[in-house]
């Protein structure tokens, strides 16, 4: 999935070793494949007498790429742009000439690596409630492995409703509080799966708010927009309804508005969770049924400069820079942690080979 070669020949040999069994620390299979293929790209570049980075750029996928067999297209890929930005920021064209430079027992090495990884799954449920005090409670079934995603993916629902974040509460980690059917936090599923699920629930909630406002003030639901914790008639914001008032009205109306009537396609776990929350306010609950055209992948290109002491075998990482094509950034700090954390783990793997 990293490259789009027009021709490729592959021959593999399995070797059984008498060593402890291996398991994934992170991104199962990703770092192993990179450790296998990236040196081959360097070897090919030497034989072709072409810049190592340029060979990767030529063969990198773009948004029109298709991956073999029945895998189909990707949702988007801007790998050449990513490589170009990384090249400039790292100063590749100058620093690559330093590779092999010696100073006594020490030698400098400059390298580059390119890698993809699949991202996400679909079809999970979103669940949220606006209570009479005007708070948006976003219920999350995913856990928290320290990647921020349990909170970050909730923001997709708040953003779709134009709800100020200080009026939101994320409910997670306790099934007695009503948590919907969710992915496990594994296999890089979470961000795609639960931005989609929370967006679907937010769209359901938004429509109910519009219907409540139309019932109160007249007109049709499409005559209203939802933003800033209010439901506003288009062109006449002075007569807006606060979402807390709409929540109280939803409890009076009952049925689908406060969660006593639920969609037929949601998971049994979500049905049970929504039952716990019924009557607490206006409820948004929905399964992610959005289409997805292609596989969602993220890409990184990493640049490193190291210094190896031939006498002691000691390696100093003097410089490392990484660029990524990852789609919409949910949390800049979380993204930095993912990139730097993955890089450090890769360095550890490389030094242990």
Image (cartoon, rainbow, N blue to C red):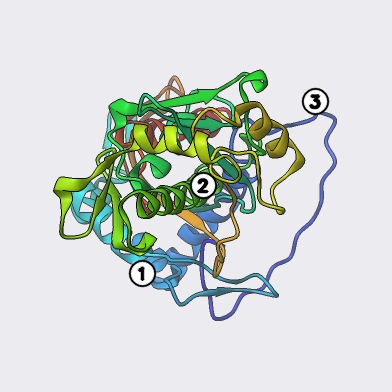
Please identify the quarter of the rendering in which residue 211 is found: bottom left
User: How crowded is the residue under tag 2: few (<14 C-alpha within 10 Å), some, or many (20+)?
Assistant: many
Residue corresponding to mark 2: 201
Quick one: quadrant of the N terminus? bottom right
Q: Nearer the viewer, mark 1 or mark 3?
A: 3
Label 1 near label 2: C-beta < 8 Å? no
Residue corresponding to mark 1: 50
Q: Position of residue 220 (x, y in %)?
A: 36, 63
Between disc 2 and disc 1, whose residue precedes? 1
Up-down relation of residue 133 to residue 90 (above or below): above
Mark 1–mark 3 distance (CA, rounded to whole Å): 40 Å
Local SS, label 2: helix
Q: Position of residue 171 (x, y in %)?
A: 51, 24
Local SS, label 3: loop
Left or right of 342? Residue 33 is: right
Quick one: quadrant of the C terminus? top right
Q: Nearer the viewer, mark 2 or mark 3?
A: 2
Tag on residue 20? 3
Q: Position of residue 44 (x, y in %)?
A: 49, 66
Residue 332 appearing in the image: yes
The residue at the point 45 percent across, 71 percent down is 59
Left or right of 33? Residue 234 is: left
């Amino acid at each position: 999935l990293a490259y789009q070669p027009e021709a490729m020949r592959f021959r593999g040999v399995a070797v059984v070793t008498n060593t402890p069994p291996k398991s994934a620390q992170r991104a199962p299979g990703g770092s192993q494949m990179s450790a296998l293929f990236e040196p081959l790209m360097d070897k090919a570049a030497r034989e072709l007498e072409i810049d190592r980075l340029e060979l990767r750029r030529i063969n990198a996928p773009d948004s029109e790429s298709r991956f073999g067999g029945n895998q189909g297209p990707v949702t988007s890929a801007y790998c050449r742009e990513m490589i170009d930005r990384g090249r400039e920021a790292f100063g590749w064209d100058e620093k690559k000439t330093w590779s092999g430079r010696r100073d006594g027992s020490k030698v400098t090495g400059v390298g580059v690596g390119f890698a993809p990884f699949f991202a996400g799954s679909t079809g999970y449920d979103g669940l949220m409630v606006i209570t009479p005090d005007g708070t948006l409670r976003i219920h999350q079934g995913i856990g928290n492995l320290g990647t921020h995603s349990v909170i970050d993916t909730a923001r997709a629902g708040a953003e779709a409703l134009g709800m100020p974040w200080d009026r939101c509460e994320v409910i997670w980690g306790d099934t007695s509080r009503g948590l919907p059917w969710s992915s496990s936090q594994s296999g890089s599923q979470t961000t795609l799966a639960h931005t989609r699920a929370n967006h679907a629930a937010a769209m359901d909630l938004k429509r109910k708010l519009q219907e409540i406002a139309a019932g109160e003030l007249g007109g049709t639901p499409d005559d209203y927009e939802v933003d800033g914790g209010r439901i506003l008639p288009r062109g006449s914001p002075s007569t807006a309804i606060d979402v807390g008032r709409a929540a109280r009205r939803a409890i009076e109306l009952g049925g689908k508005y406060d969660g006593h009537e639920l969609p037929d396609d949601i998971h049994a776990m979500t049905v049970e969770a929504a039952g716990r929350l019924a009557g607490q306010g206006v409820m948004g609950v929905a399964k992610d049924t959005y289409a997805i055209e292609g596989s969602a992948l993220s890409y990184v290109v990493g640049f490193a400069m190291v210094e190896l002491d031939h006498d002691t075998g000691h390696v100093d990482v003097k410089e490392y820079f990484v660029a990524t094509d990852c789609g919409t950034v949910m949390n800049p700090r979380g993204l930095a942690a993912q990139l730097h954390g993955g890089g450090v783990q890769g360095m550890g793997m490389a030094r242990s080979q």
